[in-house]
Amino acid sequence: MKKGIWGRRPLVKRRLGRAPFKEDPFTPAFWKAYQKRFRSREDELFLKPDFWDQIAEGYDDLEEQAFYRSMVEEIVASLEEAGALSPSKVVLDLACGTGTYALRFAPRVKEVWALDISPKMLEKLEEKRRAAGLENIRLVQADWREYTPPRTFDTVFVSLTPLLNDLSQVDRILKVTKRFLGLVQWAGLRENELYQKLLEELFKRSPRKRSPGAVILFNYLFSRGYPAEVRFFSGVWERRRPLEKEYRRFLFKLQGEGLSLSEEDRDRVRAFLERQAQGGEVRSRTKVRIAFLLADFLREPLAFA
């Protein structure tokens, strides 16, 4: 696993597209306008509970990945070292999934609010919460875009959710953050070799261009006067899923590409995965680069002339 180093250097890219922006790149408006270039109506598919419900059953197999476990433990240790996790803190784990982080936060803090849109994800978290005997995790099943918490939180943590691709939702997150904000986001690399092969062979295309992710988040916070510490993690996830589950997951992803799939297309996708399957399971490898951003709002804010 390759890891970056902490730093607060702006991540502004030299070329931000063909059409120049009139806004100053050190303003929030610039980054909001830039991020909109990567949004499409298909993104809504990944903000609904259906997608997350269907992958909840096998979601925890990521914990079997040494790279993933190491990344999670180092992120938790960094939060604790910064003071974002301590016995007096109340934490919001937004888009908590099956509790990868919430279960690790709970022994270190006063209370964790674990919020997710997926009932199936929260069912898994509740099973694990009971098995661990943790009484200080409060489960909240809600769509963050329509939910207003009744309180603010000492620390807000958000990991690998499409919500972070909408800076208006980041604004809402900032409003409920009293001091620490921890964000885990894709950092320019999320390449599933099997999915790319399927797209190329069956549809003669490559995956659509995605948001730069962490680059935008860092610079958006920077433009608002909140410099974040940044750390990068690079590695490979290798997963095995039952053929039927991988088939349904790929159909969702293909819809996210803007493809309208006919019955013939669906049959071709299933046949492709059947050719890849071994013992009823499909193996896939995903190359990833992930960034962890940590902002402390009690630091002296940046000022721009």
Image (cartoon, helix red, strand yellow):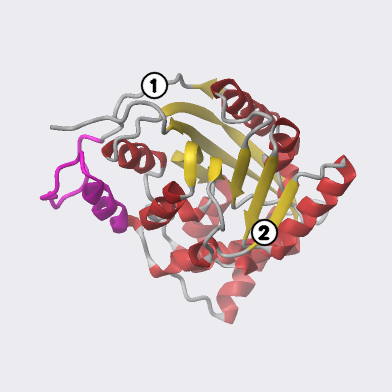
2 relative position to 125: left or right: left
Residue 140: mark: 2
Q: CA distance from mark 2 to mark 1?
A: 34 Å
Q: Secondary structure at mark 1?
A: loop
Does the image show residue 43?
A: yes
Residue at 48%, 76% in the rendered image: 260
Q: Which residues are magenta?
A: 13-37
Count of picture labels: 2
Where is residue 50 shown, x and y percent of the image? Answer: 64, 69
Crowding at dot 2, Cα within 10 Å, few <14 / some 14-19 / many 20+, comes out as many
Residue at 60%, 62% in the rendered image: 250
Sequence order check: which comes first, mark 2 or mark 1?
1
The three-letter code of the residue at mark 2 reads Val
Magenta highlight on residue 32:
yes
In the rendered image, which quarter contains the N terminus? top right
254, above or below 67, in the image: below
Residue tagged by mark 1? 7
Residue at 45%, 64% in the rendered image: 43
66 relative position to 256: left or right: right
Residues 247 and 129: in front is: 129
Where is residue 207 shown, x and y percent of the image? Answer: 44, 55
Residue 89: mark: none
Helix, strand or loop for the magenta stretch, by majority? loop
Does the image show residue 282?
A: no
Judge depth for marks 2 and 1 and give the one in front.
2
The three-letter code of the residue at mark 1 reads Gly
Q: Are marks 2 and 1 in contact (CB under 8 Å)?
A: no
278 relative position to 158: left or right: right
Crowding at dot 1, Cα within 10 Å, few <14 / some 14-19 / many 20+, comes out as few
Residues 162 and 268: in front is: 162
